[in-house]
Image (spheres, helix red, strand yellow):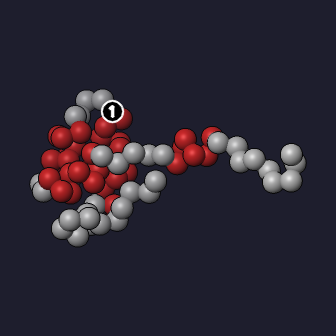
Amino acid sequence: MIIPVRCFTCGKVVGNKWDKFQQLIKTKTVKPGEACDQLGLERYCCRRMLLTHAELIDKILQVTPIRAGLN
């Protein structure tokens, strides 16, 4: 799934922080909560948008669709 551009609750733009958030988390030196602090996400509703996002597109692309008419 694609990260939402705005927070569902307050409407603040959070989509532009996703790449930086991923970079901070992948270094393994920064915890997710600390990464949100560094990005300036103070409201828990905005933090939720990044912390609970699941990147499913990689899993979806691995599934091979069944071709119609080959049965």
Q: Is residue 59 visible?
A: yes
The residue lying toward the viewer, choosing from 71 and 11, is 71
> Foreground: 40 or 61?
61
Task: Write the residue at 37% across / 51% down.
Answer: 19
Left or right of 15 in this view: 46: left
Q: Is residue 60 left or right of residue 29?
A: right
**Residue count near mark 1 (Cα–Cα under 10 Å), binned few <14, some 14–19, many ≥20:** few
The picture places residue 63, in percent across and down from the top left corner, at 64, 42
Q: Nearer the viewer, residue 35 or 9?
A: 9
Q: Residue at x 15, y 47 (%)?
A: 37
Furthest toward the right, the residue is: 70
Q: Secondary structure at mark 1?
A: loop
Q: Position of residue 71 (x, y in %)?
A: 86, 46
Residue for point 23% across, 34% down: 30
The amino acid beneath tag 1 is Thr
**Which residue is the site of mark 1?**
27
